[in-house]
Image (spheres, rainbow, N blue to C red):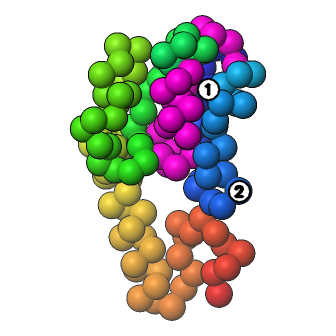
């Protein structure tokens, strides 16, 4: 792929899932985008892949840790764009989040199942 956009949860199995082995299998013209969880990407390996030209660039809306250490070399790389975890900060998205939260709250008050549940298998 030309672009790898990460959209996954962070679990013990997915921590550092995107590492030097992953980057070695990617095109050297590829761009990595992470808007999910910072812990999914091994930032040391990512830095090396970007410095050596193994990857063309990266866009990070999440880092590990947050906030990112000001000395992190990724912040000074011309082929990296780092945002402070604001990728979802649009008016439409925030309105939708508020409506979902209100919907869940009203359902809970009525003793009903909340409609906006991700892990329904653990919801009793």
Whole-Å distance between the Cαs marked 2 and 1? Answer: 19 Å
Q: Residue 54's image quarter?
A: top right
Quarter of the image that includes the C terminus:
bottom right
Tag 2 residue: 13
The image quarter containing residue 31 is top right
Task: Give the mark nearer the N terminus: 2 vs 1.
Answer: 1
Q: Indicate the quadrant where residue 22 lies.
A: top right
Report the residue at 35% width, 18% height from top: 77
In this figure, what is the number of numbered marks? Answer: 2
Residue under circle 1? 4
Q: Position of residue 10 (x, y in %)?
A: 58, 55
> In the picture shown, does residue 67 fall above or below 111?
above
From this viewpoint, is residue 90 visible?
Answer: no
Residue at (64% x, 35% y) in the render:
19
Residue 71's place in the image compared with 9, above or below, is above
- Secondary structure type for disc 2: loop
Front disc: 2 or 1: 2
- Residue 29 point in image, percent of width and height: 60, 8
Locate residue 41, reporting x and y percent: 55, 40
Q: Nearer the viewer, residue 24 or 11?
A: 24
Q: Are marks 2 and 1 in contact (CB under 8 Å)?
A: no
Image quarter where the N terminus lies is: top right
Question: Dot 2: within a 10 Å radius of its alpha carbon, few (fewer than 14), some, or many (20 or more) residues?
Answer: few
x%, y% of residue 60?
42, 33
Q: Secondary structure at mark 1?
A: strand
Magenta-colored span = 26-49
Q: Is residue 7 left or right of residue 27?
A: left
Q: Which mark is residue 18?
A: none
């Amino acid at each position: 792929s030309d672009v790898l956009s990460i959209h996954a949860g962070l679990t013990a199995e997915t921590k550092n899932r995107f590492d030097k082995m992953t980057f070695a299998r990617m095109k050297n013209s590829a761009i990595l985008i992470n808007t999910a969880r910072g812990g999914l990407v091994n930032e040391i390996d990512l830095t090396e892949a970007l410095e050596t030209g193994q990857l063309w660039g990266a866009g990070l809306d999440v880092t590990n840790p947050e906030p990112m250490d000001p000395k992190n070399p990724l912040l000074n790389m011309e082929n990296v764009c780092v945002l402070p975890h604001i990728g979802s900060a649009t008016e439409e998205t925030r309105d939708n989040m508020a409506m979902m939260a209100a919907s869940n709250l009203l359902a809970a008050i009525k003793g009903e199942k909340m409609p906006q549940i991700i892990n329904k298998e653990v919801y009793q």
